[in-house]
Amino acid sequence: MYAIVEMAGQQFKVAKDQKVYVHRLQTEEGKKVTFDNVLLLDDGKNVTVGAPAIDGAAVEAKVIKHLRGDKVIVFHKKRRKGYKKKNGHRQSLTEIVVESIISSGAKKAAPKKAAAPKKEAAAKVAAPKAEAKKAAPKKSASKGDDLKKIEGIGPKIAETLTAAGIATFVELAKTDAAKISEIIADVRGNHVTDTWPAQAKLAADGKWDELKKWQDELDGGKA
């Protein structure tokens, strides 16, 4: 018997006693973990396919250990700009072993019914464009700063910091470099955060010329 199941955002084909390496789980070593998003089951005679998941099916596993994967080198270069950056990344992983595949009572999940179109929606389509523009709500202005202006911070890191509640230069300047490294631990790349709070302090104070001069001497945020 084997199953196709989603584990930590990835899909795996697993069987009993099989070892699998998944993205880092929060479960402690030696503890058991259950994955109930089973997409397909094959018991050797019958194949059950979910829609999208199979109701009542699950995969039980035991956490063996937490580890980090092999280093991956990421090299960026801009032609005719004299720009080169080399980073190394090691993904945080968890080794688990599949103990059992539960299929009792497994059945396809009923597909969701498409919602019927509302009469109000049809009425809005027929409304004049001028009236539609008038009724449209205004978008609220973003209160955050552009954290990408800090040397070493890219779009993904800026998004991660904002999600963690650090959306302005002032907030970044008040955050310890070690805490920043902890927040962006899952972002791919080798990031040096030592200078980020100090850079953010200059940006918050509006000292852009001083910041620009310092950034010209930095490499990915590293002095």
Image: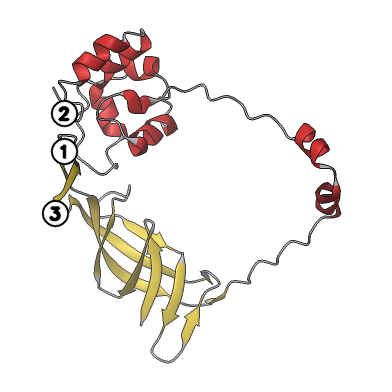
Nearer the observer, disc 3 or disc 2? 2
Give the amino acid type for the residue marked by disc 3 in the picture. Asp
Left-right relation of 150 to 217: right
State the residue position of label 3.
70
Residue at left offset 40%, top offset 68%: 5
Give the amino acid type for the residue marked by disc 2 in the picture. Asp
- Does residue 111 appear in this view? yes
Vertical placement of residue 111 versus 119, above or below: below
Q: Secondary structure at mark 2?
A: loop
Mark 2: give few (<14), some (14-19) or many (20+) Cα within 10 Å: some
- Does residue 174 appear in this view? no
Q: Position of residue 212 (x, y in %)?
A: 25, 16
Q: Secondary structure at mark 1?
A: strand
- Among the two numbered marks 1 and 3 on one chain, the one whose residue lies closer to the N terminus: 3
Q: Are marks 2 and 1 in contact (CB under 8 Å)?
A: yes
Left-right relation of 131 to 20: right
- Among the two numbered marks 2 and 1 on one chain, the one whose residue lies closer to the N terminus: 1
Q: Position of residue 178 (x, y in %)?
A: 23, 26
State the residue position of label 2.
219
- Quarter of the view holding residue 21: bottom left
Residue 85 badge: 1
User: 99 and 40: which one is in front?
Assistant: 40
Residue 20 badge: none
Vertical placement of residue 111 versus 9, above or below: below
Q: Position of residue 105 (x, y in %)?
A: 53, 77
